[in-house]
Image: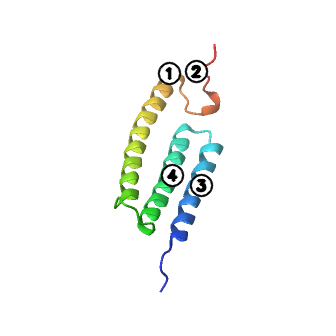
Amino acid sequence: MLSLTLNHYLVLGAVLFAIGLYGALSRRNAVAILMSIELMFNGVNVTLVGFSHYITSSVPLLGQIFAIFIITVAAAEAAVGLAIIIAIYRDRKTISVDELDLMKW
C-alpha cells in the first residue's frame, strides 16, 4: 500500500503551480489568464495543507486556515477580474490582452 508523504504534496503543488504559471504567461485570452491564476492558487493551497499535515506547529490546522484565506482571496479576485473583463469587453469588444491599450495616451 502506497502512503502519501510530504514530497507527494509538494510535487503536486509544484506541478499545479507550474501549469498555472505557464498558462498565465502564454495565454492571450484574459479569462484563460484568470483561470491559470486560480490554478496557481490551488497549487499553493495543496502545498500549505501538506505542510500543515506533516509539520507540527503550536497552532493546529494552520495550513488549512491559510488555505481558506487563499480561497477567499481567490474568489474575490475572480469576481473583480471577471467584472473588469466584462467592462473592457463592453467597451472594446475584445478580451485579448494583446489588443488592450487602455494605459496609452
Residue carrying label 4: 39
Residue carrying label 3: 19
Q: Are marks 1 and 2 in contact (CB under 8 Å)?
A: no
- Mark earlier in primary sequence (4, 3): 3
Give how far across and how far down residue 76 sits, in percent.
39, 39
- Mark earlier in primary sequence (2, 4): 4
Q: Judge depth for marks 1 and 3 and give the one in front.
A: 3
Give how far across and how far down residue 48 sits, in percent.
46, 58
Among the 4 quarters of the image, the one containing residue 80: top left
Marks 1 and 4, how far apart at CA: 28 Å
**Side of 18 where 37 appears, left or right:** left
Marks 4 and 3, how far apart at CA: 8 Å
Residue type, mark 4 in image: Leu
Camera-nearest residue between 88 and 9: 9
Residue carrying label 1: 91
Query: Residue most toward the top?
Result: 105
Marks 1 and 3, how far apart at CA: 31 Å
| Disc ID at residue 102 | 2
Q: Judge depth for marks 1 and 4 and give the one in front.
A: 4
Dot 3 surroundings within 10 Å: few (below 14), some, or many (20 or more)?
some
**Side of 20 where 46 appears, left or right:** left
Under circle 1, the secondary element is: helix
